[in-house]
Every structure is written in C-alpha cells, then in structure tokens.
Amino acid sequence: MKVIDTELTPCVFRYKIIIEYLGSGFCGWQRQESCISVQQVLEESIERLFKEKVLLIAAGRTDAGVHAYGQVAHFDLTKEIDVYKAVRSINYFVRPHKVAVLACQLVDNSFHARFSATQRQYVYKILCRPSELIIENGLKLWVREPLSVESMQQAANYLIGKHDFSSFRATSCQAKSPIKTLSNIEIIKQGDNINIYVSAPSFLHHMVRNIVGSLLLVGRGIWPAQKIKEVLEQKNRIYAGPTAPAKGLYFLAVKYPK
C-alpha cells in the first residue's frame, strides 16, 4: 500500500466523512495496540477498498464506551473517488462492527476535521425511573430515584461561559490549558428521559462526564445548585462529583465555518 505524505504529495484529494457508531466494545476512537478502536476499523476498511494507507483525523477522540451520532473525520487519497459509492463500500467493509459512514464529500485541502471545527456538541442520556433499564441497557444511564431537572439546570448555568475547568478535568488530561468556553448546557426532560446537551468549541478530557456526575448530585438533592459554582472556583478535580459512566454519552454534532 502507498503511504501519503501530504507535504510531499501535491495532488491529494481530501474527503470528509460523517460517522455513527456504538462505542460499546471499542477502546474509543483512537488506535491502540491492545484493543480495537473505531479509527482502526474505518482506516482498515478504507485501505482495503482504495488500496492506499490512510490516516483518519477525527473532530473528537471519544473514550471507550462513548457513542456517536455525528462524528466527523477526514482522510486523504491520491485519487478522486465516487463519494456515493464510497459510503456503501466502506460500510460493507466495516461489518460486523457497529460503525456506519453516513456521508462522504470531497473538501478543500485546507479543511481539517479537528482544527477547522468551531463548535462541538455532546448529549448525555439518562433514564430516570424506578424500574431497571432493559431495552436500552448500555445506551443510557439508569437512575432509580427522581431527579430535579430545574435544580440541575440552575447549577449548569453557572458553567456557561469562559472558565478554568480544572475541577472537571481528568487527571490524565493532556490539554495545555484548562481554560474552556462552554457555549451552552440545556437539560430537557421528556417523560422518564432526561437529556443533557452540552456545546463548546472544544472540551477537556472527561469534561462532559465530570460535569454530568456533579449535576447528578444536584439533581438528587445532595448538593444545592450553587455548589457547582463553588466547585468551579476551586479549580481542583477533588471537589467535583464522580465521573458519569461512558455509556450515556454521545458525540452529537460538529459545526464548521460556512
């Protein structure tokens, strides 16, 4: 297989793909030697189809067990392809893995799935009811006791804006700065379902799951809503709540400049 060096190969065609996947059974997006990743499954499928070795760059590196509705990635080839046939063919080669390419398009070489993104959105799904979660087990977090969505939203509002999010940052996070701008947090309850939508240009490692873990303490009445503001101001992970399980988190969408 040919290996593409985009700096040395002037004639390169860049393709953007939108991907949906179930994170269960994967070690996350990024390739690892010890277990299978979403990136590996897709790269190997594209390589088998087009006979070129590719590097797939994603908008966000989801953790093990995290799902995606609208992950975005790009890859380069030395030839132009039929993007409609590519979608069907890549999906054929990824079987039986729970991964699907939803769309593929030729883009300008200046496009970068990660660095061109202006906004990323996640949703965390909770089923709140006394009975155990059955049909969607592994796809949502089950909470037995009632949650106060109003208190959770009040607490979440303290996090909107530009802050030092060290209190909601994983100890293993490699980001250079803990300063992030949270664009919006919206908590919507429909029947027994509670969805927490979180939007920002970028996130720290485990940031959304750590925020959700703290909001659950508020929803259960263990913390008052203003406690979140105090935790944020402490700038120390030990003051925040536990990390919410990965199974309830979905990479929802990415926005790019028009």
Image: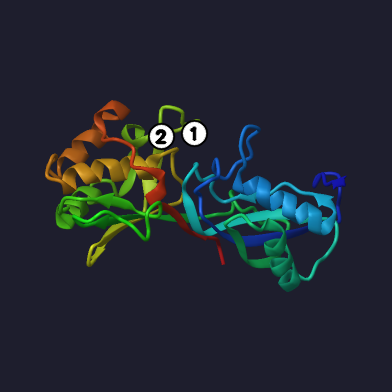
Mark 1 closeness class: few <14, some 14–19, many ≥20 residues within 10 Å:
few
How is the model colour-coded? rainbow
* Amino acid, disc 1: Ala
- Marks 2/1: CA distance? 7 Å
Q: Which mark is residue 245?
A: none
Q: Residue at x 20, y 48 (%)?
A: 155
Q: Are marks 2 and 1 in contact (CB under 8 Å)?
A: yes
* Amino acid, disc 2: Pro
Residue furthest to the bottom in view is 84
Asked which quadrant contains residue 50, the reply is: bottom right
Q: Classify the position of the C terminus by image quarter.
A: bottom right
Q: Position of residue 168 (x, y in %)?
A: 34, 36
Q: Position of residue 114 (x, y in %)?
A: 58, 49
Q: Tell whether 37 sits left or right of 169.
A: right
Q: Tell whether 198 sits left or right of 82.
A: left
Q: Which mark is residue 178?
A: 2
Q: Tell whether 86 sits left or right of 23.
A: right
Q: Which residue is mark 1?
A: 175
Mark 2 closeness class: few <14, some 14–19, many ≥20 residues within 10 Å:
some
Label 2 element class: loop
